[in-house]
Amino acid sequence: MHVRPAWLEIDLTAIADNIERLLSVLGNQRKLIAVVKDDAYGHGATIVGQIAQQCGAHMMAVSLIEEAIELQPVCPQTDILILGLVPLDAVPAAIEHGFHMPLDNVDRAEAISQAASEQGTAAKVHLKIDSGMHRIGVPSDEVGQLCREVKGLPNLDIRGIFTHFASAPDDPLFTTQQFERFQQACREAESVLDRRVLLKHCVNSAATVRYPEMWLDAVRPGALLYGIPRNRGGQYLPTMDQALAMKARIASVRTLPAGEKLGYGRTWQAPRDSRIAQVPVGYGDGYDRHLSNKGELLLRGRRVPVVGSVCMDSTFIDVTDISDAKVGEEVVLVGSQGEESVTIAEIAERCGTVVQEVPVRMNVRLPRVYTCQPGDERVAHLADRYRSATSDVSA
Ligand SMILES: Cc1ncc(COP(=O)(O)O)c(C=O)c1O
């Protein structure tokens, strides 16, 4: 059977190690809510969910009810929090599945409570506080009022309270302000409800790395689990390993005489007689067009420059300095080869985007190959199971 000579390789050992490293730093007192939304940032939510459950994550978080429904059968012992607002017509299904949902206003509270009463149960909700992100949530200074209004609703089970930081990687002042507003909101909610709200959580990856004092009852990272934070490790956490690699095999090699221009828009001109290899991956696979004349790939453990515009299905590299580069040779667009590596953080930086966007965009049409380190009992069964269901394009 034909297999495409381009693929994403996902190292399950790296994900399991990252989760275990994080859990060991958190200790017994704090829990991990593993963010596996958007197909676990392109790594495969059902597989990452199983690893997270097995390693001891307390809860999974996704954006959509559809994602939660897909995840639940493989993580039956782990509660799932839907981070986005659940459309009201989907609320009964969310309750039936036992998902946790954010609560941001009294109308939603009444609708959720009503739907739960019709099922003879209580819906699990987390008060969502808008402490400055201004996306969803009750404004932090209105949470007392909301709690007074919902306190009497019999079918609401308020399990948690959370907020989300707008600028955790680069604005400590505003992050601290958001945290203080959140703390104040927690105090007000608990005072009005007259009980402790069990799960207070606010930190994403960047804040988990930087602010251990904000970890509270649970941390809620996504990027960190996959080893793609902007800064590798930090004062409080060990370095995490990047799990994802993008690889391909050279499709063709040609000589371009000095002075010739290359590809769409003819944006690159050969400064000398050049050997140009065509790699069968393009922006249609999430290899960003901003990498035109800017990116670097790895070939034989060396960096080689991207030349010309990245096309939808292919990318050119200048291999003049590796003049015997051959059709079929493996190149690494993201990941490591020998001593060299191209990190997701590097790609994000070159493209002027956030690290989270890079793997998510690579999740469109490349086959995924799951690998693990030899002898890794924790994840070998997952790598095996998935490998038998897909073609092993890396072989
Ligand atoms: C509400 C919420 N919490 C946590 C996260 C995890 O963020 P990160 O990947 O930066 O850790 C996200 C992701 O955007 C989010 O929307």
Image (cartoon, rainbow, N blue to C red):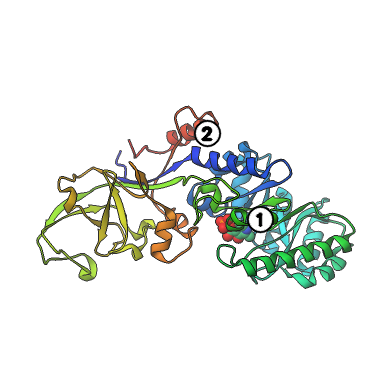
Q: What type is the residue that disc 2 sits on?
A: Val
Badge 1 vs badge 2, beta-carbon distance below 8 Å: no
Location of residue 111 with respect to 285 vertically, above or below: below
Q: Which residue is mark 2?
A: 379
| Quadrant of the rendering where the N terminus is positioned | top left
Ranked by sequence position, the earlier of labels 1 and 2 is: 1
Crowding around mark 2 (Cα neighbors within 10 Å: few <14, some 14 to 19, many 20+) is many
What's the amino acid at mark 1? Ile
Q: In x, y percent, where is residue 365?
A: 39, 52
* Whether residue 392 is visible: yes
Label 1 beta carbon less than 8 Å to ligand 1: no
Where is residue 31? Give x, y as percent: 69, 46
Asked if residue 63 can be seen in this view, the reply is no
Answer above or below: position of 17 versus 334: above
User: In the image, what residue occupies the spot 24% across and 64% down?
Assistant: 308
| Residue 73 x, y percent position in the rendering | 62, 41
Residue located beneath label 1 in the image: 82
Q: Secondary structure at mark 2?
A: helix
Disc nearest the viewer among 1 and 2: 2
In three-dimensional space, the C-alpha distance between marks 1 and 2, rounded to whole angstroms, equals 26 Å
Q: Nearer the viewer, residue 324 or 153?
A: 324
Image quarter of residue 18: top right
Q: Quadrant of ligand 1?
A: bottom right
Q: Secondary structure at mark 1?
A: strand
Residue at x 76% of width, y 63% of height: 183
Q: Relative to 394, say whether 313 is above or below.
A: below
Residue located at (43% from left, 33% from top): 388
Q: Where is residue 277 drawn, in percent x and y?
A: 20, 53
Q: In this image, 104 relative to 296: left or right? A: right
Q: Nearer the viewer, residue 199 or 171?
A: 171
Report the number of numbered marks. Answer: 2
